[in-house]
Amino acid sequence: MTAAGQRLGNNFHQWGFKLKTDTIQGLTPSNVNVDYDYLDVYDIKLKDGRGFSKDYSTDNGYAFVINESFAKEMNMESPVGVAVGHSWYPDDSLGTIIGVVEDFNFNSLHYDINTLAMVVHPDWGYEELSVKINGNNIEAAIGDIERIWNNLVPDWPFSILVSG
């Protein structure tokens, strides 16, 4: 199970981002707030560095995983360890790129893959919950998920979007 601020295929928001090399450079990639298990649940492949981990306190809000397209736009062969952050972060509190993932389609398939930065901000909350299930007994799995959902959040309606 994982969560994110937006659903794959739903055209992720773009917002200001800054990169610190010799100077501070402004960029505007697509961005998404994800939880720690996002890369694993979606089988998003790391090319360099590591994914998010609760073992590192700075992964909460100050660690970024970017895609290959973003690394190319920055003209960096290996951007892991580079200081970056959201445009509203003070320069002295920038985070770090901890990983680079292979490009994948995160917006509508009508669009080319563009630059992406992922960050973990649990305090921002999540809009989308994704559950990966074994395809051998889909109806039973959905029934189990619905029962758990209704027990934990009875005031919110249960709805699913099946993909795959």
Image: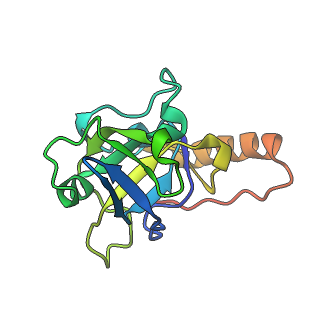
> Measured from the top left, where is residue 139 in percent x and y?
58, 49
In this view, the residue farthest toward the right is 155
Which of the two residues, 106 or 53, is positioned nearer the viewer here? 53
In this view, the residue farthest toward the front is 23
Residue 79 falls left or right of residue 19: left
In the image, residue 116 above or below residue 123: below
Quarter of the picture containing the C terminus is bottom left
Which of the two residues, 141 or 55, is positioned nearer the viewer here? 55
Residue 93 falls left or right of residue 154: left
Colour approach in the figure: rainbow
Residue sitting at 53 percent across and 25 percent down? 57
Q: Is residue 108 visible?
A: yes
Residue 84 falls left or right of residue 151: left
> Measured from the top left, where is residue 155 in percent x and y?
86, 54
Residue sitting at 32 percent across and 73 percent down? 109
> Measured from the top left, where is residue 35 in percent x and y?
53, 41
In the image, residue 102 above or below residue 111: above
Q: Find residue 1 and report its image quarter.
A: top right
Residue sitting at 78 percent across and 59 percent down? 157
In the image, residue 87 above or below residue 154: below
- Total numbered badges shown on the rendered structure: 0
Residue sitting at 85 percent across and 49 percent down? 154
> Measured from the top left, where is residue 127 in percent x and y?
63, 57
In this view, the residue farthest toward the top is 55
In this view, the residue farthest toward the bottom is 110
Which of the two residues, 59 or 139, is positioned nearer the viewer here? 59
Q: Is residue 164 visible?
A: no
